[in-house]
Amino acid sequence: MDCKAPTCVYNETKKKCQKPNAYVQWMSKCRKTINSIKKCKTLYSNSVNKHKKNACDYYLENSKIKNSTCPKSRIPLNDKCPKDYPIKKLNKNNDECCYKEKKIVQKIKGIKPAEKPRFPELQPEKLINGKLPKIIYKYQHKSKVNKINK
């Protein structure tokens, strides 16, 4: 739905146009140009009414700026990637990101040395009438200590 100034943001839950928060929109716009938060706050407090009138303009400016889904170190600057990440590709969100080269490791299949059997008693020579014998495991039996009630 199209909303006109001063109520330029459509709220889905309330189903009506609303005015954007002037302070939030100003701080977002100011932080992109001026790095100091204190300076942005003082500029806002000096002319509050002006910023309230221009809240829709700030909102439209801030919504046009596309945030990248790439990490900061992997965003291409001037269509060039840094040396650490030389390859430029699109990620799953269709943003250009820089990536490292994939190292292709070829595995060579060789002859494995003969392994010792885990259970030598189960060797085919030990078969009795074509069946394996039962293995009886012996455990150490310890006597239980009875508690004495006093």
Image (cartoon, rainbow, N blue to C red):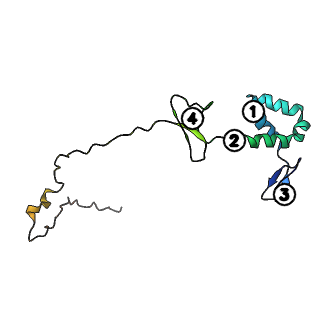
Most foreground residue, 19 or 70: 70
Q: Choose the circle earlier in sequence order: 4 or 3.
A: 3
Which residue is denoted by mark 2 in the rendering? 66
* Type of amino acid under label 2: Lys
Mark 1: amino acid: Arg
Q: Are marks 4 and 2 in contact (CB under 8 Å)?
A: no
Mark 1 residue element: helix
Q: Residue at x 35, y 40 (%)?
A: 105
Residue at 58%, 30% in the rendered image = 80
Secondary structure at numbered mark 4: helix
Give how far across and how far down residue 61 sits, in percent.
Answer: 78, 40
Disc 3 element: strand
In three-dimensional space, the C-alpha distance between marks 4 and 3, rounded to whole angstroms, equals 40 Å
- Disc number placed over residue 31 in the picture, else none: 1
Going by the picture, which residue comes out furthest to the right?
Answer: 49
Q: Which residue is mark 4?
A: 74
